[in-house]
Image (cartoon, rainbow, N blue to C red):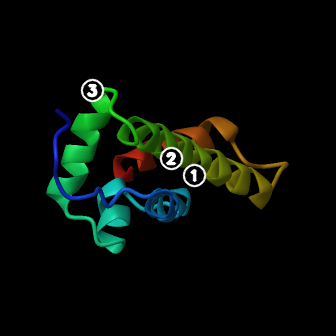
Amino acid sequence: MAKMGRPTKLTPEMQDAICDHLRNGATLEVASQAEGIAKVTLWNWRKAAGEGVEPFAEFLNSVECARSAFETNTLRRLAELDAGEVDHKFAHSLVKSLTWLL
């Protein structure tokens, strides 16, 4: 018999909203809280994702893609500041140092 419980708050719209925050540089906790998701709920989603349960596994994959998009876009913007003088190794290390935010 399937486990009965209340429906998940993780809808495609919620996933998109959280990932939009991430693409703009928010942490996962801040993005989730901005959308009304409690830390314990986020923790449960991550646990379920680790067990391969859908839609949570897809959510975690989307989170990683959004984080990568933020990093890539940040590097591109830094490079565009002054294409002739930007030290790309420095820019990359700067972005990596910002990953504590993620």
Asked whether 73 or 65 is in front, the reply is 65
The mark that comes first in sequence, 3 or 2, is 3
**Quarter the N terminus occupies:** top left
Quarter assignment of residue 35: bottom left
Task: Give x and y (percent) for residue 69.
Answer: 61, 47
Real-space Cα separation, disc 3 to disc 2, in angstroms: 21 Å
Q: Which residue is mark 1?
A: 70
How many numbered marks have been drawn onto this rendered protein structure?
3
Asked whether 28 or 44 is in front, the reply is 44
Real-space Cα separation, disc 2 to disc 1, in angstroms: 5 Å
The relative height of residue 64 versus residue 79 in the rendered view (above or below) is above
Task: Give x and y (percent) for residue 61.
Answer: 48, 37
> Of the numbered discs in the image, which one, if any, rests on residue 51?
3
Contact between labelled residues 2 and 3, with CB atoms less than 8 Å apart:
no
Mark in front: 3 vs 1: 3
Asked whether 11 or 37 is in front, the reply is 11
- Tell me the kind of residue under disc 1: Phe
> Of the numbered discs in the image, which one, if any, rests on residue 97?
none
Query: Badge 1: how crowded within 10 Å, few (<14), some, or many (20+)?
Result: many
State left or right for residue 102 relative to residue 41: right
- Tell me the kind of residue under disc 2: Arg
Q: Which residue is mark 2?
A: 67
The mark that comes first in sequence, 3 or 1, is 3
- Extreme residue toward the front, this view: 1
